[in-house]
Image: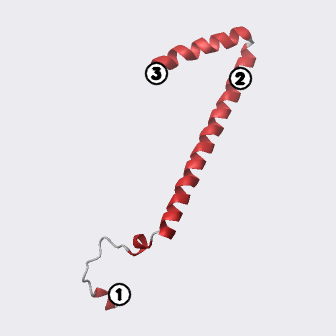
Amino acid sequence: MFVCRDFFGPTFSGIVTKQSSFAWTMTYYSFGSVAIVVAIMVLKLYRGIKVSHRKSRSHRTSKTAVNFRPNAAVNNNDETKPLLS
């Protein structure tokens, strides 16, 4: 993976620089970098909304998940005692 990056990066840069000037090459790269950053942010935002929407739907439809208490004993009668005594 890293070998491909080390080969294709300078090769592509050389081809683009030969076709246009160095200033235009840097302009192309800056627009490409901004486009990649925006795409990553949109993807992260989409995944965050997707996960939060899935969590909110699972809590609304599942009644057992709300009433389930894994650490509570089955015959625990301490609920009638006051908390502050």
Question: Identity of the amino acid at label 2?
Answer: Tyr
Picture colour scheme:
secondary structure
The label nearer to you, 1 versus 3, is: 3
Residue at the front extreme, as displayed: 61
Disc 1 crowd rating (10 Å Cα; few below 14, some 14-19, many 20+) is: few
Image position of 27 with respect to 12: above or below: below
Please name which of the two marks, 2 or 1, marks the residue nearer to the observer: 2
Identify the secondary structure beneath mark 1: loop
In the displayed structure, 47 sits above or below 64; it is above
Q: Do the residues labelled 2 and 3 touch (CB within 8 Å)?
A: no
Residue assigned mark 1: 83
The quadrant of the picture occupied by the N terminus is top left
Q: How far apart are marks 2 and 1 (CA)?
A: 67 Å
Which residue has dot 2 on it?
A: 28
Which of the two residues, 54 or 5, is positioned nearer the viewer here? 54
- Of callouts 1 and 3, which one flags the residue occurring earlier in the amino acid sequence? 3
- Identity of the residue drawn at 58% across and 54% down: 49
Q: Return the x and y of residue 36 as percentages of the image width and height.
A: 63, 33
The type of residue carrying mark 3 is: Phe
Residue 43 image position (x, y, % from top left): 59, 43
Which numbered disc, 2 or 1, marks the residue that appears first in the sequence? 2
Query: What is the three-letter code of the residue carrying label 1?
Result: Leu
The quarter of the picture where the C terminus appears is: bottom left
Foreground pick, 69 / 24: 69
Side (left or right) of 72 relative to 36: left
